[in-house]
Image (spheres, helix red, strand yellow):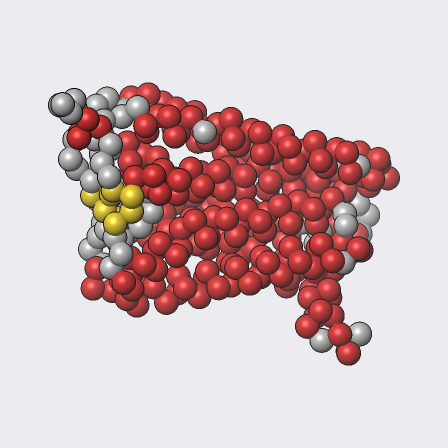
Amino acid sequence: MLHPNKTRFHPSSFLLMGIPGLEDMHFWIGFPFFAGYLIALLGNITIVFVIQTEHSLHQPMFYFLAMLACTDIGLSTATIPKMLGIFWFNLRDIVFGACITQMYTIHICTGLESVVLTIMAIDRYIAICNPLRYSMILTHKVIAILGIVIIVRTLVFVTPFIFLILRLPFCGVRIIPHTYCEHMGLAKLACASIKVNVIYGLIAFSLGYIDLSLIGFSYVQILAIFHLPSWDARLKVLSTCDSHICIMLAFHLPALFSFMTHRFGHNIPHYIHILLANLYVVVPPALNPIIYRVRTKQIRECVLRFLNPKSY
């Protein structure tokens, strides 16, 4: 005999609604998302390939860039194909296990991206403020340790999300007004108290503030270069940071806008919230390879040499 609560604990699947309020535009919305996915996939794979094959790029900054590119591939692949399935083919169903996996992958990738951007800011601080000791500080051993720390910190803080969702009972409501599965979107469907989920979510989100504080500290120290005697020297030093600043803004600004609209934009239409949340997972993976190919001379030259070897 079946336990009376068994059928209400975990549903077999959920229904992702896409962008509620813009259903008639789903088909057309899919095209920029598809373009963004192609750019993210091809651009980041190119960057990883170039860094791996070009010996001159085997430097700390480019190792961190390769980590960022791999994270972007994972984030865009975890979200955009399912979005396109919703927009173009009305494939709204997602089984419970796949939804949990997507949630976990998204939070892992965004967590990794945040901490990698922080490490990249510290890398720029060391390169600019302690250039003579740069190679002594960021040895291959230190980079390997940093890579392990990046992964372990993210796993430690993201993995509990799985168990926080699995402990919750779901009482028949399985409609998610979103394009992908995320922690609070799932928790709100539960028919039990989600206070623990809310508190832990805020704790995990606060890590982003810690990362931003470390980035801010690094750039405050870098601003000391304005004591250099000439503007040429100042601009030359700052030019080594512009790519990182652009990528950091591309990652954190959509997240900030999404957070602010959820907290304070109660009169803002729901589809705006969803669009901002989508920008958070679509824009950075597509922009990052473009920024680094345009703004970083070594990457640009290696890509051009790979595409047209006869001209070099």
Q: Residue at x 51, y 26 (%)?
A: 156
User: Which residue is nearer to you in this view: 292 or 87?
Assistant: 87
Q: Residue at x 45, y 62 (%)?
A: 36
Q: Residue at x 46, y 60 (%)?
A: 37
- Name the side, left or right, on which 147 lies relative to 139: left
Q: Tell me if residue 304 comes above or below residue 257 in the rendering.
A: below
- Name the side, left or right, on which 246 lies relative to 100: right
Q: Tell me if residue 45 comes above or below residue 276 in the rendering.
A: below
Picture quadrant where residue 6 is located: top left
Residue 122, image x, y percentages: 68, 37
Q: Quadrant of the C terminus?
A: bottom right
* Residue farthest toward the bottom in the current orientation of the protein: 310
Q: Tell me if residue 298 comes above or below residue 133 in the rendering.
A: below
Residue 166, image x, y percentages: 32, 28
User: Which residue is nearer to you in this view: 117 or 191?
Assistant: 191
Q: Residue at x 60, y 34 (%)?
A: 150
Q: Quadrant of the N terminus?
A: top left
Picture quadrant where residue 288 is located: bottom right
Count of numbered labels shown in the rendering: 0
- Name the side, left or right, on which 137 lies relative to 101: right
Asked whether the viewer can see residue 129, the reply is no
User: Which residue is nearer to you in this view: 278 or 306?
Assistant: 306
Q: Tell me if residue 257 comes above or below residue 170 in the rendering.
A: below
* Residue farthest toward the right in the current orientation of the protein: 132
